[in-house]
Image (tube, coloured by chain):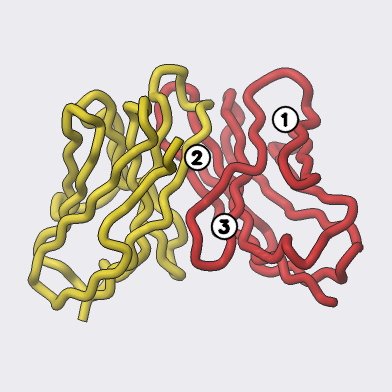
Amino acid sequence: KAGVTQTPRYLIKTRGQQVTLSCSPISGHRSVSWYQQTPGQGLQFLFEYFSETQRNKGNFPGRFSGRQFSNSRSEMNVSTLELGDSALYLCASSPGTSGSGETQYFGPGTRLLVL
Amino acid sequence: AQSVTQLDSQVPVFEEAPVELRCNYSSSVSVYLFWYVQYPNQGLQLLLKYLSGSTLVKGINGFEAEFNKSQTSFHLRKPSVHISDTAEYFCAVSDPSNYQLIWGAGTKLIIKP
């Protein structure tokens, strides 16, 4: 099976712009989670989608949003970018039906740099 | 709110020596525990996880971890490390009622030749 893919891998934006990141889960997986990884804050949970519905949400401002399509692909959007949004954004997928003990499979991440 | 503490930000160890990476979590209720590894410029990969049952969990690449409920710890061990184990290791905990993983700050394992 193909792994989790994320596009683009690298992105440079300027403050105030918005950005959309994409994640394609492993075939058959219906849960997609997003994480932000920074040197200062480490890994932080953004949100989790299952069957096109947001099932869990972390503690991020409303500028961070996401959605999931019927084929389980997911996008996350960050509006009005700030310098502090520079980070590695990781997407992970799992079947989504067996509870939080499921193994999450991670993509390689999208590295966002905000100038 | 749950939290995860990885006591060491870096652990240097000689090749073929044993290593222990420490992880403590805050919750006293039932949790699921995970160790993930992140190799340079790559995503995260599951090493092992504890859901229930035997407190000694064996994972990939010769790693194992022991769940200690009384000490709320889940330390990761390997009896003999190799240069290829150079990576950052993350401990995580999840509440069985949701899919949110709470992460430790990570421990960089540095293998000295």
**Residue type for callout 1:** Lys
Q: How many marks?
A: 3
Q: Colour of chain B?
A: red
Q: Secondary structure at mark 3?
A: strand
Q: Earlier in the sequence, mark 1 or mark 2?
A: 2
Q: Mark 3 vs mark 2: give the one in front.
A: 3
Q: Toward the viewer: A5 or B7?
A: A5
Residue B58 image point, x, y percent: 77, 35
Residue A115 image point, x, y percent: 20, 81
- In the displayed structure, B65 sits above or below A60; it is above
Q: Which residue, given by chain and number where applicable, does mark 3 sit on?
A: B38
Q: Secondary structure at mark 1?
A: loop
Q: Write down the quadrant of residue B29 in the picture.
A: top right
- In the displayed structure, A7 sits above or below B65; it is below
Instruction: Tell which chain the image draws in yellow.
Output: A
Q: Write down the quadrant of residue B40 in the picture.
A: bottom right
Q: Write down the quadrant of residue A89 in the picture.
A: bottom left
Q: Which residue, given by chain and number where applicable, does mark 2 sit on?
A: B2
B108 relative to B99 in the view: left or right: right
Q: Secondary structure at mark 2?
A: loop
> Label 2 marks which chain's residue?
B
The residue shown at (38%, 57%) is A109
Q: Toward the viewer: B48 or A69?
A: A69
B71 relative to B79 in the view: left or right: left
A52 relative to B98 in the view: left or right: left
> Label 1 marks which chain's residue?
B
**Residue type for callout 2:** Gln
Q: CA distance from mark 1 to mark 2?
A: 15 Å
**What mark, if any, has residue B69 been given in the picture?**
1
Q: Earlier in the sequence, mark 3 or mark 2?
A: 2
